Amino acid sequence: MTANPRFFSRSELVGLGVLALLLVVILPMSLDIFRLNLVAKYLTYSFVALGLVICWGYGGILSLGQGVFFGIGGYCMAMFLKLEASSVENTKIQSTPGIPDFMDWNQITQLPLFWQPFHSLTLSILAVFVVPAIFAFIIGAAMFKRRVGGVYFAIITQAIAAILTILIVGQQGYTGGINGITDLRTLHGWDIRTDSAKFILYFVEVACLFGCLLVALFVKHSKLGRILLAMRDKEDRVRFSGYSVANFKIFAFCLSAVFASIGGALFTLEVGFMSPSFVGIVPSIEMVIYAAVGGRMSIFGAVYGTMVVNYAKTSLSESFPELWQFAFGALFIAVVMLFPNGLAGAWNEYVQPLIDRTFSRNKRSTSVASEHPLANGAPAE
Amino acid sequence: MEIGQQPPDFLLAVDALTVSFDGFKAVNDLSFYVDENEIRVIIGPNGAGKTTVLDLICGKTKATSGSITFRGKELTKLSENAIVHAGVGRKFQTPSIYDDLTVFENLEISYPRGRSVFGALTFKRDAAVTERVEEVAEMIFLKDRLNMSAQLLSHGQKQWLEIGMLLIQDPELLMLDEPVAGMSVSERAKTAELLHRIIKNRSVLVIEHDMKFVEDIAHKVIVLHQGKILSEGSMEKVKNDPKVIEVYLGH
Ligand SMILES: Nc1ncnc2c1ncn2[C@@H]1O[C@H](COP(=O)(O)OP(=O)(O)OP(=O)(O)O)[C@@H](O)[C@H]1O
Ligand SMILES: [Mg+2]
């Protein structure tokens, strides 16, 4: 206890290992490229769920507008790919060649200024990180400095998601409107529509996911992680211990925004388009459901929750096209009622003790006293 | 500071402090002064405005008028965390501790280092932190409970823990709102002993209802009634004040 909390606990190392085995070995070996691409699509949402674990689970800040940040990342990437696909050569039949087709259809004759940076891949990737962070910072500073929180914050984030959707749909000429930005082809000349590209992109995505998981684990184990928990419980006590509560909330919100944005950018690459249907209220709420089903305090739960819910959604919608939405709702209610801490809670309560018992039976003969239960007092893991 | 003006002797000076909640003056033109190394107790009937006075000093509630100076600094203009950084610590009326964390972690969060976002991310639990946490834990009788989840502590222990969370900040002014409420007789005695021990380098402002405890610790007592001072002075003097007997001690 008196030592620094270890960088990762043993169970987290095991968690990382198991997830790596699943995502890097088992799924790519057992699924065809169509199914693997489907997994890749699901995984892009798990970035959002991971952000929600930090922001909502740890920080107690429920955002019902994470689609906004998913969309920002997705559009940043889509704008780059669209510009590359709209070379003068590809678009010579347009009245203004060299601009995206939907602009031409809307009688726009010059590329708008805010599209210009997206000629550069470096700037586009930078934008995937910086734009959501700035946007979340502005929202967070405006809300948290004024002590707006809880339900009010959730409603305001919903409103922002709704407004952004309306804006994108309304400004067809600049955004592609309701159809979004489609017909994306190459990344620096590399065709992203081929099976081999999809295969490679899947692994790029898994690498990004592990990067985000490590960041989340680092935050959880830092004093900042404990301050978030403390704030969720007794905000005033933290404030009158000399911390600026608003700044910590802003940080958690910005981090969740950047995670969501990375997910969005990868979505565009994997699926090949971006549209306002991933930005609005409904997708934003679905993303909260992923985190809730996984267990809102569980970093790994975010990934499993997202995959399970999306798998269920896909299978149900394939077999019962009319019924799946009800089934989906019922599934959500059942999980939350039975396991308020989601799949991770169920795992910790039922499966982990079983594993521990099996392990300790083997171990008892060798070492008895060296066991340190709850060595780190890690909450809810 | 003007030439010839006396440097302020008082650690805390409250002058003509007033706060009005929709016209209701919970604290009304209140003035009092706290010396260095003094234990000052505020007593008074329920709703007298005692907690509100602490809220005003620590910045939780904004004053309608009046001033609060702490070591010559005007507190009414500072943010809550700036007031803490200036050296004012405050315990709440109901024990406010972090249930999800261990006793160690509760104390560690209050350790005055790494209070910015970046500082908290890079905070290292080094020997200085560990030593200080253990030292404070010893003082508040929780040395053997460091790894325990704070929610498992008894009510009295939670009160001590919160006092410890303030001690670790090493504030020059410590404000305690009913620190022995809900404690057993023996816990009260230990708390009194604790307060006597921590007074050495700081002043303490205590709100308390328990008269026995007040007599035990107070250097000076303020009796508050309807947001105003009814009587002020030594416990002996206050106890025999007919006005005090009538509104507070009589029943
Ligand atoms: N934020 C607020 N808004 C409106 N009225 C308030 C507020 N805070 C306190 N009051 C009122 O001010 C009065 C003084 O309250 P305060 O909590 O200071 O009393 P107290 O002396 O601490 O009482 P107790 O002994 O019960 O703790 C009460 O009538 C209370 O209702
Ligand atoms: Mg009170």
Image (cartoon, rainbow, N blue to C red):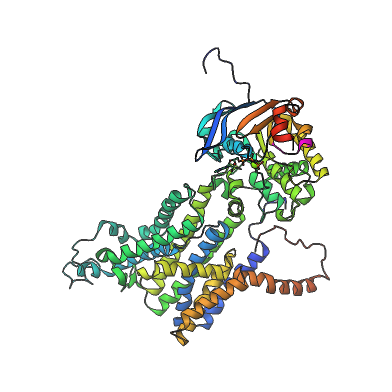
Q: Name the side, left or right, on which B232 lies relative to B62.
A: right
Closer to the camera in the image, A304 or A233: A233
Q: State the residue at coordinates (82%, 66%).
A: A367
Q: Residue at x 35, y 62 (%)?
A: A164
| B235 vs A331: above or below | above
Foreground: B20 or A132? B20
For the point 60% across and 55% down, which residue is it? Answer: A229
- Asked where in the image residue A348 lies, by quadrant, the reply is bottom right
Q: Nearer the viewer, residue B165 or A359?
A: B165
Which quarter shows the C terminus of chain A? Answer: bottom right
Quarter-of-image position of residue B138: top right
List x then y, in percent, for residue A372: 76, 61
Magenta residues, as a range? Answer: B207-212
Q: In screen coordinates, is A359 left or right of B109?
A: right
Q: Does A139 appear above or below B197?
A: below
Q: Tell me where residue B163 appears, x and y as whole percent.
A: 70, 42
> In which of the image's four quarters is ligand 1 placed?
top right
How many circles with numbers are drawn on the protein? Answer: 0
Q: Quadrant of residue A350?
A: bottom right
Extreme left residue here? A95
Residue A244 x, y percent position in the rendering:
54, 44
- Left or right: A223 in relation to A315: right
Give x and y (percent) for residue B57: 58, 35
Is A89 positioned to the left or the right of A185 in the image?
left
Residue B223 makes an appearance in the image: yes
Residue at far top of view: B4
Magenta highlight on residue A102:
no
Residue at the far bottom in the pictured view:
A319
Instruction: Tell me if residue A211 can be seen.
Output: no
Residue B211 lies in magenta, yes or no?
Answer: yes
